[in-house]
Amino acid sequence: MNLHDQHLIAISAGELHSVALTNDYQCFSWGYNHYGQLGVGNYETYAIPQRVDFFVDKGISSIVAGGFHTVVITNEGKCFVWGCNFDGLLGIENEQHAALPKEVIVGNQERLISITSGGQHFLAVCENGQCVSWGQNQQGQLGIGNYAVVPSPQVIPLPTNNS
């Protein structure tokens, strides 16, 4: 299977890898794969798009390639990540890099509606209107009031209209 026969609806570029989403919710990835950021179950680099088989029977609403990782939100609002997991960047229990998608649990199984990623951190909007963040935080980019690494999603305390 190749992208010539596909209708793309989204594409994203990481540091040295790329991911694409088709109109039938298939995810494809290609490029550098040292940390498993392609999500194909190995650490080989590919110059031709590879289908991420994990999502064959799941609907994907969005994809984002970060520095050396990838994140998707399914149509059910679930978050899946894979790739580089230094300092628990991915938000999963395991400290190992992930060559296959792993689910990130957000709060009390909150549904996500939007997600983005920097080089080493994530920001997501939950269906309940809250914003969560996790990952590296050397410059305070997570918005949680400190500079500590956050290995799991934390609610960003946004100011109220009164503050």
Image (tube, rainbow, N blue to C red):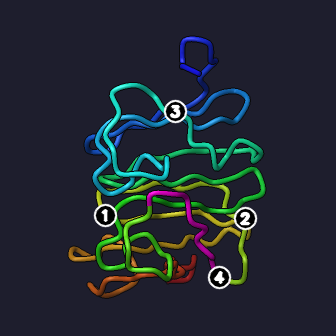
Distance from disc 2 to disc 1, alpha carbons, whole Å, reads 24 Å
Q: Which residue is mark 3?
A: 20
Closest to the observer: 67 or 116? Answer: 67
Secondary structure beneath dot 2 equals loop
Q: Which residue is mark 2?
A: 127
Q: Which residue is mark 1?
A: 120
Amino acid on which disc 2 is placed? Glu
Label 2 or label 3, whichever lies nearer to me, is 3
Magenta stretch contains residue 101 = yes
Secondary structure beneath dot 4 equals loop
Q: Residues within 10 Å of mark 2 (few under 14, many from 20)?
A: few
Instruction: Determine whether 22 is above or below 120 in the image.
Output: above
Mark 2 or mark 1: whose residue is earlier in sequence: 1
Distance from disc 2 to disc 3, alpha carbons, whole Å, reads 24 Å
| Residue in the picture at 54% in, 12% down | 4
Main SS of residues in magenta: strand
Label 2 or label 4, whichever lies nearer to me, is 4
Magenta segment boundaries in residue numbering:
99-107
Label 1 or label 3, whichever lies nearer to me, is 3
CB within 8 Å, label 2 to label 3: no
Instruction: Determine whether 81 is above or below 135 in the image.
Output: above
Mark 2 or mark 4: whose residue is earlier in sequence: 4
